[in-house]
Image (cartoon, rainbow, N blue to C red):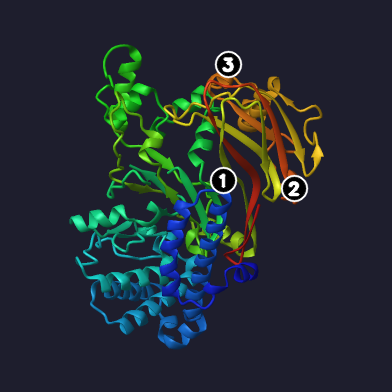
Amino acid sequence: MEELKEKYPNYEEMDIETLDSELPYLDKDLRESETTEETQDINEEINYVQELRRRKILSEDLTREQLAEKFPDLSNLSYDDLMDRGDRLLNEIILSNLDEDSFKEKSEELRYVRMLSNDYQRESNLNKLLNLRDKVKKRDLIKRDDRSRLQRLRLWARENAGILSAVLISSSAVIIGLVASTRNILWKVGDTTEKLDKRISELVNHQIELPPVFQKIADGVELAADNIWIIIIKVAGETAYDCSGESLYEIYKDLWLTVGDRSKMTEQGLASENLRKLISGDDLGVKVGDANKVADALLHSVYGSKLRKPIDKIIADHGLYTPFSMNNNPMYILTLPQSDEIMTAQGGEAKGNYKLDNLELEYETIENDALASEVSRMYSTGRSLSYKHVTLMRTSNWDKDLTIVNENINIPRKSMSAIVLLFTNRVRTDSEEYIYPNIDKVNLTIECVPNAVFSQGLHKNRFFEEAKRLFCPMCEKSMADEFMSISKFFSNGFAVVIDLRSTQDDTTGGRKKIVNTQSGVLLEIKKRATTADVQCNIFVVSDALLNFANRDLSSIQY
């Protein structure tokens, strides 16, 4: 932070409101950035402003001791009475027309109720941590054009986000959804006016914030086509994962699944072309004919147009997670692709837009006091969550006549696992097509040391084996029931993989440590001319750790 403070000195003296006003301008600069370096600099500045804003907010909040002195009677209440008091406060905050001072005081009292409820956690069933009454189904929280109450609700949501598994707040301050997972209660704020429709289209960054173990499905809010091909994961305001090429990389990984595994992913959109047409409502989808068409019709009758997207990166790999015992929970920020990135038109027709209807949030809970207490204890005493950090470092255009290409990877990493190059046509018509750009050999130099991994370079007859080492699961090394064959690899499933792991497993640490970012990793690629220009996407895969102590994030390493 001190280094960033020196780099961006003007922000330190700004108040929270001024910092808020700066973010839209930075977002605009980010969208208009033309180089990778410029994008990284602006992202760094945005992250600094957001972290500075978070710290200023925390500095203005009363401490637990100050809250205890201000509301001494709350600590004497039983658990049930405490929850009843929380219910009444919540109703007053949302439904009553409070002035600013009264609203702030009740927000502080409700925040202290949350703190005290955490003390009951080891003795209370998890589904009672937030005892909001089931009779509260939907409420008209905000009247049209009543902007002051909206702002107060936003303040309340910020101060009490700890008791919610997620807080969805649009940056235009028009739609707010509060999800209380333990009681499965959803408040929705809606408006059918054209003014709201316009606001929706102006959402800054077109982003939706979702809680950890929730899954996105196509039920409630309609989204324009400007928005999940970028995923950002933040913990306590710090970015733990940020990949702008998420779909490009994840779709390629799925090509290495077995045929059996891929056939079980229909609900995630992995299906035959005919079934995808049926799901998307294309008139060309066929339900009669051969056995495959009949099978497609049956699956479509079961799943309809609903698709499932697991949003469980990092958290799902480490057993159970107890969000109510943590001071800060992960925030998943997803950005949908432009329509021209995922849609094709026939006969020169315009692609138009698309929308997702009826978004649903789905999660699983285990209600077991002893288990919850044990998981909570691990995060209190100290725990590290390992994961793969993937970054799309650069996308560059290769002219069709190039025969030698030099690519430099100059970002520092404590444990770099692999470098992956994926090649696509400049205009994509198939999301699962990764072309082979006639590469014959790759020479590798790491921090000025030539042939650091391959003594005589990586030749084209080794490309398949290197990709298989990284992407094929350990249990499938024999390639039984394989979807990715050697012929498919070179036809439309190609990748250049530089595997930097010491051993062929997913053990965290022990990979290449890149310190010298001036030299970094240099790839000298020898190739033959192609019939058209090629787009090269360079991904850097690294080992990463989320370190927790005292139920809070202590550090992120990668």
Please name the residue shown 26% across and 15% down the image: 288
- Mark 3: which amino acid? Ser
Q: Which residue is mark 2?
A: 513
Q: Is residue 465 above or below residue 59?
A: above
Q: Quadrant of residue 348?
A: top left
Q: Specify whether 417 is left or right of 66.
A: right
Helix, strand or loop under label 1: helix
Q: Tell me where residue 52 appears, x and y as whole percent.
A: 53, 70
Q: Tell me where residue 361 appears, x and y as whole percent.
A: 36, 49
User: What is the number of the mark on residue 481?
Assistant: none
Q: CA distance from mark 2 to mark 1?
A: 24 Å
Q: Tell me where residue 496 appears, x and y as whole percent.
A: 64, 30
Helix, strand or loop under label 2: strand
- Mark 1: which amino acid? Asp
Question: Observer-nearest residue: 225 or 36?
Answer: 36
Q: Tell me where residue 281 appears, x and y as whole percent.
A: 26, 30
- Mark 2: which amino acid? Lys
Question: Reading the chain from its start, which is encountered first: label 2 or label 3?
Answer: 3
